[in-house]
Image: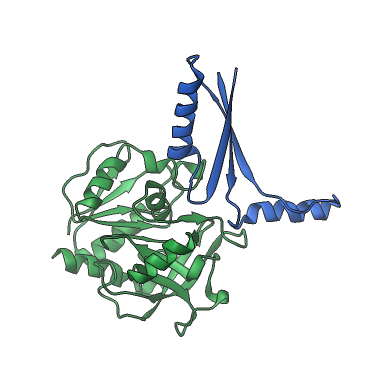
Chain colours: A green, B blue
Amino acid sequence: MKAVIVQFPGTNRERDIAHAIEVAAGAAPQFVWHAETSLPACDLIVLPGGFSYGDYLRVGAIAAHAPIMADIVKKANDGVAVLGVCNGFQILTEIGLLPGVLMRNADMTFVCRDVHLRVETTDSVFTRAYRRRQVITVPVAHHDGNYFADETTLDALEADNRVAFRYCDTNGAIDPASNPNGSQRAIAGILGENRNVLGMMPHPENLIEMALGGTDGLGLFEGLAQAAA
Amino acid sequence: MKAQVVVTLKTGVLDPQGKAIENALDTLGVSGVESVRQGRYFEVELDGTDRAVAERTVDAMCKQLLANTVIENYRFDIVD
């Protein structure tokens, strides 16, 4: 799998993602600086977590207009898989590849801990290695992960089976206590219309080996590697 | 010319920051506050003298960058 990781000023999770991809796919990804205007041919484009441009204006708002973004949008529309994690998810909503917006956490606090996610669909290159309704443990680390969209958009996401992950308890039940940020309908990750774009707030790249406490995040990268093989 | 742009959250969109400010005002003992909504204010210096052109330019920059119209409204004045 040929993977490309885009770096913006303030990106800080790119090495974590690169390690996860290398473990799952056996090949190191290529880093591309945001000021470039074109990406090499690839199977996967990753927008990693961090605080691009210091979260100035709105989270992801400035990065969404970086020179590299036009080619990312073009390749996404051509069918290349695009993964946005945390700040990457925020950027994908700002550029319009995904609907809605990530707002300040409902309780105003930065949340940094493991959460449980329920896999809502296996119909994507990102989630194909999981089972539907499987409960996985993945860490979150964010201040602005409160997913918001209008009711029409939320209904459409559900009707199209585009909610990829929801926050849940250890048994997979959805309840307010398991929702770390107030996201509407407990949404932790969503797919684009063509199912080749995924945005998610949790960090699957940070739970890929037992030394870190678990491997539940590895399936996402293994699914991508299988799909590209 | 100068544009004075105000961006505010749409009605019904939860504003935890405004709520925190509201609570802080209450802690300070400020009375008479019903609610607080937080927004953003921009001053944009513009060259040119055509007001209609300026309005179109500022409207476009609001839509493209200054506001996220999923959750925010914007309004602006062009002043000399």
Q: Is residue A181 visible?
A: yes
In this rendering, the answer to whether A56 lies above or below A85 is above
Query: Where, by quadrant of the figure, is residue A132 drawn?
Result: bottom left
In this rendering, the answer to whether A204 lies above or below B77 is below
Q: Position of residue B17 (x, y in %)?
A: 64, 52
Q: Is residue A208 visible?
A: no
**What's the residue at 37%, 64% (across, down)?**
A190
- Tally of marks: 0
Q: Position of residue A167 (x, y in %)?
A: 47, 73
Q: Position of residue A194 (x, y in %)?
A: 25, 60
Query: Where, by quadrant of the figure, is residue A36 drawn?
Result: top left
In this rendering, the answer to whether B34 lies above or below A24 is above
**What's the residue at 24%, 70% (across, down)?**
A223
**What's the residue at 60%, 40% (across, down)?**
B40
Whether residue B58 sits left or right of residue A5 in the image: it is: right
In this rendering, the answer to whether A204 lies above or below B44 is below
Question: Which is more toward the observer, B57 or A68?
Answer: B57
Whether residue A195 sits left or right of residue B61 in the image: it is: left
Q: Position of residue A198 (x, y in %)?
A: 33, 61
Tell me the quadrant of the picture where the C terminus of chain B can be found: top right
Tell me the quadrant of the picture where the N terminus of chain B can be found: top right
Single out the residue that lies furthest toward the left: A229
Question: Which is more toward the observer, A24 or A155?
Answer: A155
Single out the residue that lies furthest toward the front: B52
Question: Which is more toward the observer, B50 or B6?
Answer: B50
Query: Where, by quadrant of the figure, is residue A201 drawn?
Result: bottom left
Single out the residue that lies furthest toward the top: B49
Question: Which is more toward the observer, A217 or A180?
Answer: A180
**What's the residue at 38%, 65% (across, down)?**
A156
